[in-house]
């Protein structure tokens, strides 16, 4: 794929982002690329050699989007850019950086590889969550990592039932439930004891949060499944659905939350030589080869 229009996305006040932006603009101008900069960070730049654009315009007009920041920045962009035919790459200015894998000191070398066409492209699917009240849709949104049903109060249990494709699975008293994609399996789900799922697998994981039974364990299901969480009417009224820890949807006792895979995918591009397991070793501190 030829990258002629390149967009730059990131948090306006993120540490080190201005230096990285200036470096990227200089690099892209040398390649005679049209440069779009997400409108929230354009005002901090010292150059007029780029155009302001919102995420929808970037999705429609850019061939490549470079997200500067941490995984949170990537997740925010992903919920919009997944609707468009655009490649996305991340420069890590955050902490772990599972999704933003280019080191700031290697930007030009890594982009040279990407512009030469030596790339690995992954398609990561997202989830859509819908909250129904009396069988009517009340709210909905998307998540790339996970959808979490939880209480508005800390360490407060709730009661709910889980159905998969209309079949009853279990009822539970716990702090909530995490429904995670393979991308999100190394995020909140991992902290809650969920399994790591390789990104090419078409699966979802359901991870209970502090269940009031020792027999409750994570479940891995087909990503085509429709997950239904039916909240008991005995709960208090401060329940919530969280999408990637960015978006909160209110939930009332008696509501039904349905989660399913979307048709949209985020097209993550990596330089040739990228290895998911190498990322896991580096980010999680796993041991290297013995011999």
Image (cartoon, rainbow, N blue to C red):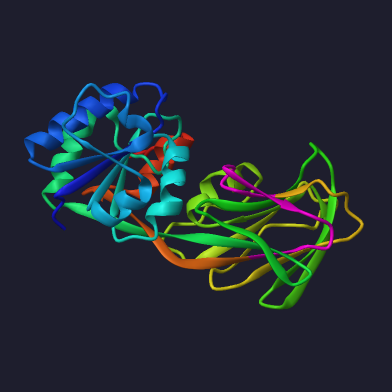
* Residue 268 can be seen, yes or no: no
Horizontally, residue 85 falls left or right of residue 69, namely: left
Q: Nearer the viewer, residue 195 or 255?
A: 255
Residue 91 place in picture, x, y as percent: 32, 35
Q: Nearer the viewer, residue 213 or 169?
A: 169
Residue 77 place in picture, x, y as percent: 41, 46
Residue 72 place in picture, x, y as percent: 47, 39
Q: Please, is residue 25 above or below residue 271 in the view? A: above
When asked about the image quadrant of residue 36, the answer is: top left
What is the span of residues highlighted in magenta in the rendered image?
A: 241-258
Magenta stretch, main secondary structure class: strand
Horizontally, residue 245 falls left or right of residue 174, namely: left
Residue occupying the point 14% across, 33% down:
27
* Residue 216 can be seen, yes or no: yes
Residue occupying the point 39% across, 57% down:
82
Q: Please, is residue 77 above or below residue 19 in the view? A: below
* Identity of the residue furthest to the right in this view: 234
Residue occupying the point 46% across, 52% down:
79
Horizontally, residue 269 falls left or right of residue 50, namely: right
Q: Tell me if residue 217 is in the magenta stretch.
A: no
């Amino acid at each position: 794929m030829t990258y002629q229009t390149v967009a730059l996305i990131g948090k306006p006040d993120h540490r080190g982002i201005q230096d990285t932006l200036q470096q990227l603009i200089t690099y892209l101008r040398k390649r005679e690329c049209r440069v779009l900069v997400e409108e929230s960070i354009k005002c901090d730049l010292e150059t007029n050699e780029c155009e302001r654009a919102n995420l929808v315009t970037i999705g429609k007009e850019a061939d490549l989007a470079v997200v500067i920041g941490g995984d949170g920045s990537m997740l925010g962009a992903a919920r919009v850019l997944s609707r468009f035919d655009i490649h996305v790459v991340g420069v890590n200015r955050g902490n772990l950086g599972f999704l933003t894998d280019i080191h700031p000191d290697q930007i030009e070398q890594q982009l040279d590889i990407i512009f030469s066409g030596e790339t690995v492209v992954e398609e990561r699917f997202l989830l859509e969550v819908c909250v129904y009240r009396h069988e009517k849709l009340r709210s909905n949104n998307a998540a790339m990592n996970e959808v979490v049903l939880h209480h508005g109060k800390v360490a407060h249990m709730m009661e709910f039932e889980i159905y998969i494709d209309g079949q009853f699975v279990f009822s539970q008293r716990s702090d909530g439930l995490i429904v995670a994609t393979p991308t999100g399996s190394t995020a909140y789900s991992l902290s809650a004891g969920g399994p790591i799922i390789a990104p090419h697998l078409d699966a979802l994981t359901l991870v209970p949060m502090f269940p009031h039974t020792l027999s409750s364990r994570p479940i891995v299901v087909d990503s085509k499944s429709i997950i239904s969480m039916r909240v008991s009417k005995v709960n208090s009224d401060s329940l919530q659905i969280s999408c990637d820890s960015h978006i909160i949807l209110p939930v009332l006792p008696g509501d039904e939350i349905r989660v399913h895979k979307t048709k949209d995918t985020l097209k993550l591009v990596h330089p040739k030589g990228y290895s998911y397991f190498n990322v896991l070793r580096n980010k999680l501190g796993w041991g290297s080869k013995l011999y």
